[in-house]
Amino acid sequence: MKNKTKLFVQITLLTALAAVLTMYPHFPTPTGYVHMGDSIIYIAAAFFGPLAGAVVGGIGHALADLLSGYPMYIPITFVVKALMGFVTAKLLYKKQFTAGRLATAAVVNLVIVTFGYFIPEIFMYGIGSAVSVFVSSPVQWLMSIAVSVILFPAMSKAKKYL
């Protein structure tokens, strides 16, 4: 029971951290904003597994949309970011950490996030505005990967204490 409670608290804290890093700092784009919150999805997925990755991604980022004034994105964000967390965990969880694995997860996630927002934004804003995701997603992706690369070694060492 103690381990389940501890895991619940850790995932809850990562979910809150994902929401905070999604909201602050963020940089506006024509159809939303760019943020560093995705890095927490990578951390949760790699160190706690598919369910944690999906929960942190889906709930944390949907909560950020709600609190940041983008409620129309909540269902899209929930699905896209939960899928991102789940897929990341399938590629990284309980596997030898390598730059190649992280790069593979990152590229797969770039496709998931870019097209996961591009398709609904066509219907929301029209194709002219929706194409902005092909600029904002790679920028956000680079920021999150950079933060993840910095955090992964520290998390790997700290994992034994978690």
Image (spheres, rainbow, N blue to C red):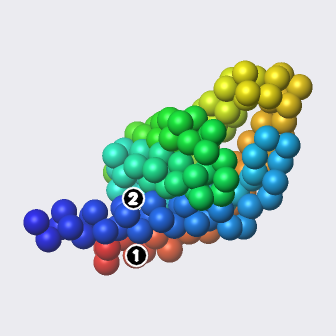
Residue lying at 72% horizontally and 67% vertically, measured from the top left:
25
- Earlier in the chain: of badge 1 and badge 2, it is 2
Residue lying at 89% horizontally and 25% vertically, measured from the top left:
128
Residue lying at 50% horizontally and 74% vertically, measured from the top left:
154
Numbered label tally: 2
Residue matched to label 1: 158
Report the front residue among 5 and 70.
70
Report the front residue among 116 and 138.
116
Visible residue check, residue 41: no
Rate crowding at label 2 as few (under 14), some (14 to 19) or many (20 or more) other CA atoms within 10 Å. many
Q: CA distance from mark 1 to mark 2?
A: 10 Å
Residue 134 picture location, percent across and down = 80, 34
Residue matched to label 2: 47
State the mark number for residue 62: none
Q: Is residue 32 left or right of residue 96?
A: right
Write down the quadrant of residue 39 in the picture: bottom right
Residue 96 picture location, percent across and down = 41, 52
> In the rendered view of the protein, which quadrant contains the N terminus?
bottom left
Amino acid type shown at disc 1: Ala
Amino acid type shown at disc 2: Phe
Write down the quadrant of residue 23 in the picture: bottom right
Secondary structure beneath label 2: helix
Visible residue check, residue 78: yes
**Does residue 36 lie above or below 135 as drawn?**
below
Residue lying at 75% horizontally and 51% vertically, measured from the top left:
33
